[in-house]
Amino acid sequence: MHKAIKTVMPNSVHRLCCWHLERNVQTNIQDGNFTLAFCSSMLTYMTVEDFELKWKNMVVKF
């Protein structure tokens, strides 16, 4: 898909949707608590600073 998008729409940026990101976490990490924390970080509106702090706390915790 990445190659096709780059070929057909060279000025676009391909991103994964939150559903795919959550599925990748569930498949590869397999820790329900991490999945909840990850989804909360991904789906909650917050400032860049708040996100970076939350992400650093997740890295320390998990």
Image (spheres, rainbow, N blue to C red):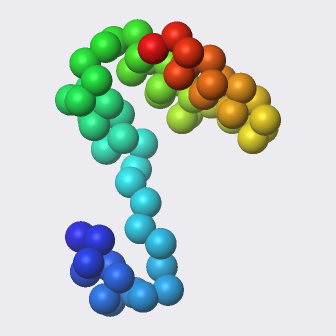
Kindly identify the residue that appears in the image at 52 percent across and 11 percent down: 61
Residue 45 screen position, x and y as percent: 69, 35
Look at the picture and state if 39 lies above or below 19: above
Look at the picture and state if 16 lies above or below 9: above
Occupied quadrant, residue 26: top left
- Along the line of sight, the residue nearer the viewer: 17 or 58: 58
Kindly identify the residue that appears in the image at 75 percent across and 41 percent down: 48
Kindly identify the residue that appears in the image at 28 percent across and 23 percent down: 29
Residue 50 screen position, x and y as percent: 75, 30
Residue 44 screen position, x and y as percent: 62, 30
Indicate the quadrant containing the N terminus: top left, top right, bottom left or bottom right: bottom left
Kindly identify the residue that appears in the image at 25 percent across and 80 percent down: 4
* Left/right of residue 5 with respect to residue 55 in the rendered view: left
Residue 17 screen position, x and y as percent: 40, 50
- Tell how many labels: 0
Indicate the quadrant containing the C terminus: top left, top right, bottom left or bottom right: top left
Look at the picture and state if 30 lies above or below 47: above
Look at the picture and state if 10 lies above or below 51: below
